[in-house]
Amino acid sequence: MLRHALLAAAVAACLSASPAFAQAPSTTRVAPTASVQSPAAKALHALFDEEWERGMRENPEEASWRGDKRYNDRWTDMSLPAIEQRMEGDRKALQRLKAIDRNALTEDDRLSYDVFALSLEKAVERQKYREYLQPIGLSGGVQTAEGIAEVLPFATVKDYRDWLARMRALPKLIEQNQALLREGAASGNTPPRVLMERVPAQIQSQLVDDPAKSPFYKPFAKFPDAISPADRAALQAEAKQVIAKDIVPAYRQFATFFKDDYLPRTRTSIAAVDLPDGKAYYDFVARYFTTTDLSADQIHQIGLKEVARIRAEMEKIKAEVGFKGTLPEFFEHLRTDPKFFYKTPQELFTAYQAISKRIDPELVKVFKTIPRLPYGVRPIPDNIAPDTTTAYYQPGAVDGTRAGFYYVNLYKPEVRPKWEMMPLSLHEAVPGHHFQFARGMELPDVPMFRRVGYFVAYGEGWGLYAERLGYDMGLYDDPYDRMGQLAYDMWRAVRLVVDTGMHSKGWTRDQAIAFFMDNSPKTRQDVVNEIDRYIGWPGQALAYKIGQLKISELREKASKQLGPKFDLREFNDAVLETGSVPLEALEAHIDDWMSRRAREP
């Protein structure tokens, strides 16, 4: 799973939205381009540039995640007038784009035009659903605002003073979020109570007696050598004062409001169709995340078909390892046998690092182009780990000043099986999300939104496809690792069934959990967190398997059409060389690539 400020699950501290209700990606800036000559091209790239600047200015957390330090002293304005102003900005940008003659553009610019148009059209279409009225999510919101410090530089005194300015501005941001929650409750636009019942504990983690134990104080616990002892002491003293006098009281008031006022007014149902105009909303997010026109019923049937296929493959692994029981009994064996688990968080973390190093030298077997940006492995912060999935990826900074990071969940190592670690690492780190984002950032002569953009069906489809590349790299020599790959493939197939089941077919939460447990060896801890994520983020989980199926279909098509001219390394490079695009655009690109390759001697 990608955890990123541009997406709703994005970062816990990216406060514009919860995992279910994110603002659309702020788009665009032109990258240096060799020649921008025609009036249409000049107008297009000027629009890209201006919209990128607007996005950074209006979404300071996103700017911070991108490595743009200009707005590190502020939060996104979450007042209703500011939200309306941003939405009006999207509408005006779309009008400007439509006024540009697409036929007068080059092929590359037409692709950029089309991708940008789709992003803006979807951003404008989703405005009517007022997603901003649910700014708090299970995986983050203003209650975990300190999380953005993970990507801030903290190299100079100014960096620390910018953070202090954000800290001082936090009470206002909490007030703005509180106003949105009140408006959402009044209009019936609330998240499911079963999810929100876990938020008070997250708020409680901010209510410290000792300011030095506040999550906001963490950057002040360690300083670079360039900062003098006098400055360190002054910054620490100011931070403690702001935490004690501003932050803790603001969170204490918010905790009371959330528990006594808001939580009782959240909805008892889980289905997206129960929101205002909910059926249209779920249809929209299903199309949005998959970048297809597939209906919920069609997606549900695809999921059932994939579940049956993968179960048959799992039966083969069960026979190979000599397990004599039923498949459900095999699942229970995989969930409970101590040999499949590390005993301590540190042992688990060390093993994740070792797997990452094992993958790295095998990448040349399946790629000709290796991105330059490095990546690292980090533990998921303790305060969000209990309510967070197994792992996620955080992209690096656009300017290369921050590496990408693979975050792994060390909470309860006794529920983190060894057999899932290889496919998980292939998906979240390399060659999955890290390759996808790092390669995108290195694309030459394309607008910035193409270099950093993120269509979930493409991005998560690639991540799931990357899990299968482990076979091509010779990494699945252990049958239990292969079972792990099948478990992860099943995980995404199950998503198609349970997401559509809960949000459009009347399934209960318990029914979805049971279906997941019946068809997957994942532990109950993971299953419950996953089901709650699908409840809180309708439609997003549909994109993974739909994207993977399309990329796998294109690989099979290319292999058959090109025959001996097919080179897997070239195909994989070709999939990544567009940056993140809708699946239809990816298919057109691969068709063009196949045609060119077929004509080569």
Image (spheres, helix red, strand yellow):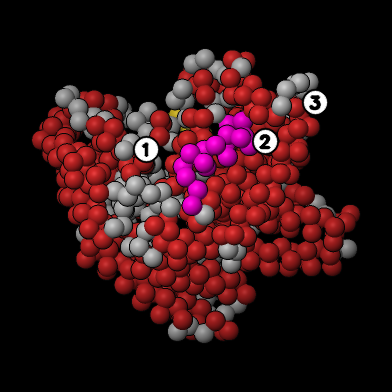
Q: Residue at x 31, y 72 (%)?
A: 88
Q: Residue at x 59, y 59 (%)?
A: 297
Q: Which residue is mark 1?
A: 150
Q: Which element type, helix, strand or loop, lies under badge 2?
A: helix
Q: Residue 226 appears in which quarter of the rendering?
A: top left
Q: Residue 394 at x, y = what percent?
A: 47, 42
In the image, what residue type sits under mark 2? Gln
**Circle nearer the viewer, 3 or 1:** 3
Q: Which residue is mark 3?
A: 320
Q: Residue 311 at x, y = what percent?
A: 71, 38
Q: Which residue is mark 2?
A: 485
Q: Nearer the viewer, residue 539 or 481?
A: 539
Q: Nearer the viewer, residue 402 or 380?
A: 380
Residues shaded magenta: 506-522
- Badges 2 and 1: C-beta atoms under 8 Å apart? no
Q: Residue at x 78, y 63 (%)?
A: 594
Location of residue 178 with respect to 109 vertically, above or below: above
